[in-house]
Structure formats: structure tokens, C-alpha cells
Image (cartoon, grey):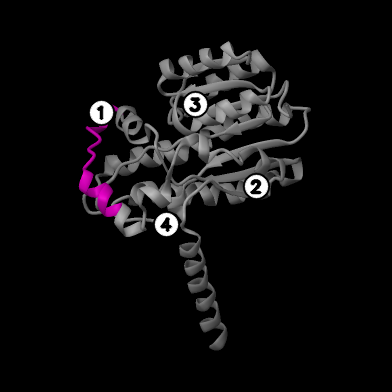
């Protein structure tokens, strides 16, 4: 029960990966703040965890809306006083060939996936600094697509590259304060991700269209199959607490793509070798 009496904040906590994280920390005795744009689902999850004895609050939060996140941080401070772990777990998806994506598509995905992470960290960092507990963590949800990009998902992949770059600098800047920053790289999961993405898109931006051909093209180009790349959210977080305990910077959840990462890195090193051969 290493999280007994400590506080964990999870965005996207109403279902999928966020809900699995909440289950994990609650089982360790943590108090939880569950944030989700779908407030009903967040409340349902909170009720479930309270029935198991956890101290949980839940609220509807749109991470793309800075005041919404700041209001959530104020409520967490009022209820818990501070927090020890912040999990900016967010990511909406918009498939489509690059020349088919609209300005609204790009703006929406960037605002949620990148600015939503930044809003969350900025709002809760003062509460992390206020904590007098043991190890403190920020756990950013990136994506396996950072390593295995596929066609027709440029908007999503670009935002996850941005999250990783942000996380690298954030880790450097907070290291001196003893606040660890880890990045989680989940591969495909059997969750409501696509359904919740469609539901979360503001009506003013137009309908979020999902074409099955785009998904199939992406999976084929990235080498993704049901057998090698998909898992439940519960399976994806099975090693999370141990990885955080060791302050690991990168956490791979599942997926058979190590060879692709090695091949990519070899090409980078070979580019260095070519440059060094012609200084």
C-alpha cells in the first residue's frame, strides 16, 4: 500500500486507460481525483471505487479549456490539500490522409492532445510542489505511434511527438525538485478511444468522421495486427507501479515493435557515421 494516504490525479479517468490507472492506484490505497470530459462516466467510476473504500472525487473537465482544468485543481486542493501523482492521460484521434485533414481537425487534436497536457501540468504542478510525501510523479501518456507511425494518422502522431518533446524538457526542469517525469507508450487497446474521440469533438468544428479504410491502411502500414499490438487497458498498466517506483523515464506497455525501434535507431546512428566520415 505504498500510495496509502497519497493523492493521484487522472484525466481521461472515466474509461479505458485512465480508469485502469485509477483502479491500480486505488488498490494501493491512494485518494483519487478523476477528471473526464464525460462527467457521468467519471462519477460512475468514482462511485465504483468508493464502494471499495477509496477516497475519490470526480468532476467533468475539458482539458482543452484552461479554466476548466484550473477549477479542477482548486477543488483537488480543497479536498486533498495537495497531490503526489498527476497523470495527464488524454488523446483524441482524427484519422485521415494528410491532404484530407482540415484546419479544424489539426487545431482540435493539437488543442486537446498537446495543450490539454500542458494545461494539466501547469494547473497541478503547484500541488505537486506542495506535497511533503515521498516520490512525486508526472506520468504523461504518449503513444506507441511515436515509434510506429502509420499513414492517415498524422494529426495524432504529430501531437504525440510534441508530448514526448515536452516531457523530455519537463523532466530536465523538474529533476532538481525531486519530481519524476515518466512517459507511457501504450499501443492499441480494446477501449472506447475512438468512440470517446468522436463524442468529445466540439460541434462547432464539424463532425469527426471515422472511415474504416483509414484504420485498415494505418494498421497495415504500421505492421499492427490484433495479435501483436492490441491489449486490454488493465494489461497495459500491469507494470506501471514498478516502473514509477524506479523513476523510469520511458514505460512501454505492450506491443511487438521492438525490432522497428531498433531499425529506426540504426538508421539514425548510420546518419551520424556518414556525417563523421565526411567532417
Disc 3 versus disc 2: distance between alpha carbons?
Answer: 23 Å
Tell me the residue at 45%/37% (across/down): 232
Label 1 or label 3, whichever lies nearer to me, is 3
Give the position of the N terminus as an image quadrant: top right
> SS class of the residue under badge 2?
helix
Give left or right: position of 199 versus 278.
Answer: left
**First in residue order: circle 4 vs circle 3:** 3
Q: Classify 263 as above or below 151.
A: below
Disc 4 versus disc 3: distance between alpha carbons?
Answer: 25 Å
- Label 1: which residue? 204
Pointers 3 and 2 in contact (C-beta within 8 Å)? no
**Position of residue 125 measured from the top left corner of the image (x, y, whole percent):** 64, 32
Give the position of the C terminus as an image quadrant: bottom right
Crowd band around label 1 with a 10 angstrom C-alpha radius: few (<14), some (14–19), many (20+): few
Disc 1 versus disc 4: distance between alpha carbons?
Answer: 32 Å
Give left or right: position of 178 versus 88.
Answer: right
Label 2 or label 1, whichever lies nearer to me, is 2
Q: Which residues are magenta?
A: 202-218
Crowd band around label 3 with a 10 angstrom C-alpha radius: few (<14), some (14–19), many (20+): many
213 within the magenta span: yes
**First in residue order: circle 1 vs circle 3:** 3
**In this rendering, does residue 244 appear at all?**
yes
Disc 1 versus disc 3: distance between alpha carbons?
Answer: 25 Å
- Label 3: which residue? 13
> SS class of the residue under badge 4?
loop
**Position of residue 189 measured from the top left corner of the image (x, y, whole percent):** 42, 40
Amino acid at each position: 500500500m505504498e500510495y496509502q494516504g497519497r493523492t493521484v490525479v487522472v484525466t481521461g479517468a472515466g474509461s479505458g486507460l485512465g480508469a485502469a490507472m485509477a483502479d491500480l492506484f486505488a488498490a494501493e490505497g491512494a485518494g483519487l481525483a478523476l477528471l473526464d470530459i464525460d462527467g457521468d462516466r467519471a462519477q460512475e467510476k468514482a462511485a465504483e471505487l468508493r464502494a471499495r473504500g477509496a477516497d475519490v472525487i470526480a468532476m467533468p473537465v475539458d482539458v482543452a479549456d484552461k479554466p476548466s482544468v484550473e477549477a479542477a485543481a482548486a477543488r483537488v486542493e480543497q479536498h486533498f490539500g495537495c497531490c503526489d501523482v498527476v497523470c495527464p492521460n488524454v488523446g483524441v484521434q482524427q484519422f485521415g490522409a494528410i491532404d484530407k485533414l482540415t484546419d479544424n481537425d489539426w487545431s482540435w487534436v493539437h488543442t486537446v492532445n498537446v495543450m490539454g497536457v500542458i494545461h494539466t501540468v501547469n494547473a497541478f504542478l503547484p500541488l505537486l510542489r506542495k506535497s511533503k510525501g515521498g516520490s512525486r510523479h508526472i506520468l504523461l501518456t504518449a503513444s506507441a505511434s511515436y515509434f510506429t507511425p502509420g499513414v492517415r494518422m498524422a494529426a495524432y502522431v504529430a501531437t504525440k511527438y510534441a508530448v514526448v518533446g515536452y516531457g523530455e524538457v519537463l523532466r530536465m526542469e523538474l529533476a532538481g525538485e525531486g519530481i519524476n517525469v515518466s512517459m507511457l507508450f501504450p499501443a492499441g487497446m480494446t477501449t472506447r478511444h475512438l468512440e470517446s474521440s468522436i463524442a468529445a469533438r466540439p460541434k462547432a468544428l464539424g463532425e469527426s468522421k471515422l472511415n474504416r479504410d483509414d484504420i485498415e491502411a494505418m494498421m497495415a502500414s504500421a505492421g499492427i495486427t490484433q495479435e501483436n499490438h492490441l491489449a486490454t487497458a488493465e494489461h497495459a498498466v500491469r507494470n506501471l507501479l514498478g516502473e514509477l517506483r524506479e523513476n523510469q523515464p520511458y514505460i512501454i506497455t505492450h506491443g511487438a515493435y521492438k525490432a522497428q525501434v531498433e531499425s529506426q535507431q540504426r538508421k539514425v546512428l548510420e546518419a551520424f557515421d556518414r556525417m563523421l566520415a565526411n567532417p
